[in-house]
Amino acid sequence: MSCGQYPARAVLGEELSIEAVVFREGHDAVGCDVVVTRPDGSRAPFLRMVPKPPEPDQWQAVLPLDAEGLWTFRVEGWDDPLGTWWHDAPLKVDAGVDVELMLEEGARLHEQLAAALPSRGASAQTKAERTELAALVKALRDTSRDPQERLALALAPALVARLEQSPIRRLVTPSPEHEIWVDRQRALYGAWYEFFPRSEGAAPDADGIMRSGTFRTAAERLPAVAEMGFDVVYLPPIHPVGRVNRKGPNTPEFPGGNPNEIGEHDPGSPWAIGAQEGGHDAIHPDLGTLEDFDAFVARARGLGMEVALDLALQCAPDHPWVREHPEWFTTRADGTIAYAENPPKKYQDIYPVNFDNDPEGIYAEVLRVVRHWTGHGVRIFRVDNPHTKPLAFWEWLIAEVKKTDPDVLWLAEAFTRPAVMHELGRIGFTQSYTYFTWRTGKTELQEYVQELIDASDYMRPNFFVNTPDILHASLQYGGPPIFKIRAVLAALLAPTYGVYAGYELYEHVAVKPGSEEYAQSEKYSYRPRDWSQPEQTLAPYLTMLNTFRRAHPCTHWLRNTVFHPVDSPDVMAWTKQTGDDIVMVVVNLDPHGAREATVTVNLPALGMEWTDTLTVTDAVTGATYQWGERNYVRLDPFFEPAHVFTVRRSTP
């Protein structure tokens, strides 16, 4: 637990529920407010807290978050003498005890309220309030009038309701300050599409040599990506690729790229960043110029998408940093620089940066690189292996960028230990890769989603169905049905999900049995694809899912996920609800055969009665059904493995 060390997280338009336990000794009334400082530094009006029944001393308030940036708030509890008087005066006056004393105490409290009203430049309304309070004070002291009549004037509901908004606050006791960072909506919700610009438009030249695509040819792919409904185009590194220790296409013997057979024109891994043409702030010359990149970003923006750029803090042996700052790397006992390893894989083409050596210089250089790309329209960074760098560095870097560019988002690609993944979220990463790729069974999926819900105040998941180096065994052997199943799970369980290009073409062949590497890994080769066969692509299905997500705001949230009982271990059902917007998904997790099951809908969890009936309409087939508490389903993965329902209440 961070115990308030880091800000909580929210998105623009969300409401923050604030709760507190507030009490004092004795029987006098207490009140409490939320004191809010907005991102621009202005102090918002006091936000009054109200009791939260049924437990005593529980108070609550709701804070609308209508601006991006860092909000701070504290709870202030205080003695409420006017509230005490409102409680005690009727009891004593009715009982004839200390009648005039109680009315005099009331007069003095209302005099205090009148004195607190602004006098200089007062509005007509303020002047009227002062006149009203003066008349009330006079009446409370008028012993010629009936005490009950005088008391009734002070307890008039309209007057009490107004005075409750400007109370007398005594013995104010503040809580510690709390922080919440409010991001733009893309931090929570979106659909990502990953592709390599060098593969789009790659083609053999007159000599049969495969030549790289460019930003200009890659831009021709953008309209199709936008048409499928994706919001973010994520590009692997676009920088010059090192020539020293460059690796050739992967093979079963070398699934991490073949270091022994390097063709003159093999492009190498884009994660082996840096060569004589430049480093992390340079464009690979095969892709074009910085102006071409700017045009690519502008084209994506014009289609309603934005570009996410890979931030991989590692270097090829011929990166300028290696020459200019050899102290930024780890030197082994034999004098060589240590390359990256993930035994048995060896990445001789990559030198990790050692942040223990000259942290001040490294920090400043990385910040310069990030600001370079934000200056060219990049507002999202997908960070490669952030768990292998100091967490203090990321906390510093993200905070520094937020000072000038609060809309910049950060995705942590950290398939690592849960505690580290969670801490990356706490210190500032906007989103996180997850273990979703390896969660395929019903029980483990439901338990994992609940785990993510429990952490959703600081860690937002991004469910990628595949990546350039993660081809899960289920995709290798599940045929086209598993591609639909995993897309439904990713798109409709998580607010943010992603696919790597080729998913819509059912690419599923691994380099060897037991490996998650693709047979033709795009990390080491050009991989132009034929997008011209619409009958052989999952693109229409992805379009349907993304269209459905945009039409239903309830799918933009994680915390509203409710799983419903199903009497089959292979069929999973869940709903998401925001107000009257309700969707239900029922999916057969087995891509190899049809499953029949009974879905029990927890109607009270949807704010309904057990006897209510539902009209459910399937976005996949267009069919409409009448559902109640218990409902039969049959899902054949070779026809349609999932129901994607819009839900309406049929009975009032």
Image (tube, helix red, strand yellow):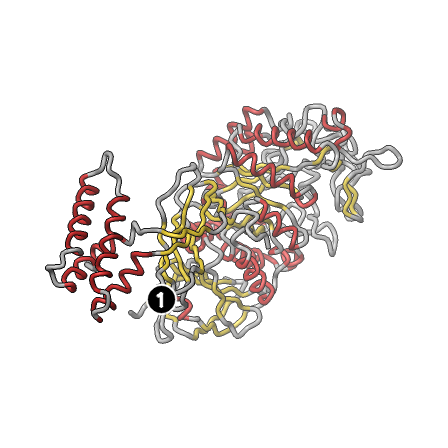
**In the foreground, 633 or 398:** 398
**In the foreground, 207 or 115:** 115
Q: Can I make out residue 291 in this image?
A: yes
- Which residue is outermost to the right? 334
Left or right, 59 with reference to 318? left
In this figure, which residue is indicated by the disc labeled 1?
615
Residue 473, image quadrant: bottom right
Could you tell me which quadrant the C terminus lies in? bottom left
Q: Secondary structure at mark 1?
A: strand
Q: Position of residue 266 (x, y in %)?
A: 73, 33
**In the foreground, 536 or 556:** 556
- Which residue is outermost to the left? 144
> Height in image: 191 above or below 607?
above
- Residue at 24%, 38% in the rendered image: 119
- Number of numbered discs visible in the structure rendering: 1
Residue type, numbered disc 1: Thr
**In the foreground, 266 or 195:** 195
Q: Position of residue 193 (x, y in %)?
A: 54, 44
Structural crowding at the residue carrying mark 1, measured as other residues with C-alpha within 10 Å and reported as few (<14), some (14–19) or many (≥20) = some
Q: Can I make out residue 221 in this image?
A: no
Q: Position of residue 196 (x, y in %)?
A: 61, 38
Q: Position of residue 333 (x, y in %)?
A: 88, 37
- Residue at 23%, 65% in the rendered image: 98
> Height in image: 129 above or below 623?
above
Left or right, 57 with reference to 164? right
Could you tell me which quadrant the N terminus lies in? bottom right
